[in-house]
Image (cartoon, rainbow, N blue to C red):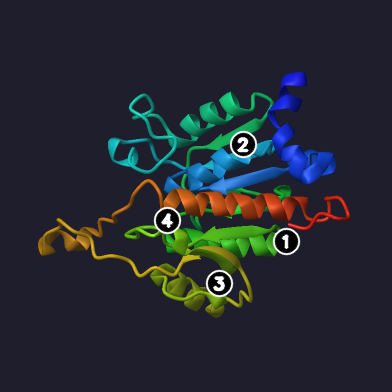
Amino acid sequence: MRNMLEQFKRTEILIGRTGMECLQQAHVAVFGIGGVGGYVTEALARSGIGTLDLIDHDKVNLSNINRQIIALHSTVGKYKVDAAKERILDINPKAAVNTYKMFYMPDTKTQFELSKYDYVVDAIDTVTGKIALILQAQAAGTPIISSMGAGNKMDPSAFLTADIYETSGCPLAKVMRRELKKRGIEKLKVVYSKEKPLKPLGIDDADSEKKVIGSNAFVPSVAGLIIAGEVVKDLISGHLPDNRDI
C-alpha cells in the first residue's frame, strides 16, 4: 500500500486525495489500442485509473514500432490488448484490466453495455465503428471522447480539443460531422488536428488505392496524451478542492 501511495503522490499533489480516489474508482473503456489508443491507456494507467477495458483485435507487427508505445520487437505477434495489459499491470499492479480481442463494429456492439463505464474513448480507425460507438455511448448517457485523424501529419502542436461541429481542416472530422448530423447527434468532444494532411511519399500511383497512411512517433502519441488528459480532468471535475480549477 505504501508503494502505491508513493507511486501516485505527485498526481495527488495536483488533484488532492478525493480526486485521486475518483480516478482509482473509475472504469474506462478504450476502443482501439493503436498509435493513439496505446498512449491513452499508458497515460490513464499512470494516472491511477482503477479499471480499464481494452478492445482491439489486431496483433503487434513490425510496422507499428515507429509509433505505438506497446510495439516492441519483444511484443511483435502478440495481441495488442495483451501487450497493453502486461504494460498496464507493470505500471499499476492493482489495476483491473479486461481485454476483448475483437473489433468494435455495428454487428458486435451488442456485446458491450456502455452504461457500466464512467468514460469511453473512441480511438477506432473506421468511420462505421466510430459512428456506432458514439451513438451507443450517447444513448447510454456515457461520456465519450473521439479521436479524429492523426495520419499523414507532422505537427504535434496542431491538435485541439473541441466539439465535432467546431472542427476544421481534418478530412475525417468532415466526414464525421456530416454523418453525425444525419443521425441527430448534437455534440461530441473530439481531439483533432488543424494541420492539412501531407501527401504520402514513395508510393506509386498504381498502389495509391491501398491508402497507405504515413505516421510517426510524435503525432499520434500527442493526440493520445491529450485525450487521456481530457478523460482525467472530466472524471475528477467536481471532486477537487474548492480553490482548484483545471
Q: Which residue is mark 2?
A: 45
Camera sees residue 79: yes
User: 3 above or below 203?
Assistant: above
- The earlier-in-sequence mark between 1 and 4 is 4
Q: Kindly report the distance in space between the C-alpha atoms of the residues bearing marks 4 and 3.
A: 16 Å
Which residue appears at 44% of the width and 70% of the height? 194
Disc 2 vs disc 4: which is toward the camera? 2
Tell me, for residue 141, which label it has, or none: 1
Q: Which residue is mark 4?
A: 125
Image quadrant holding the N terminus, namely top right
Disc 1 vs disc 2: which is toward the camera? 2
Q: Kindly report the distance in space between the C-alpha atoms of the residues bearing marks 1 and 2.
A: 24 Å
What type is the residue that disc 3 sits on?
A: Ile
Picture coordinates of residue 2 (x, y %)?
Answer: 77, 20
CB under 8 Å between discs 1 and 2: no
Q: Residue furthest right?
A: 242
What type is the residue that disc 1 sits on?
A: Gly
CB under 8 Å between discs 2 and 4: no
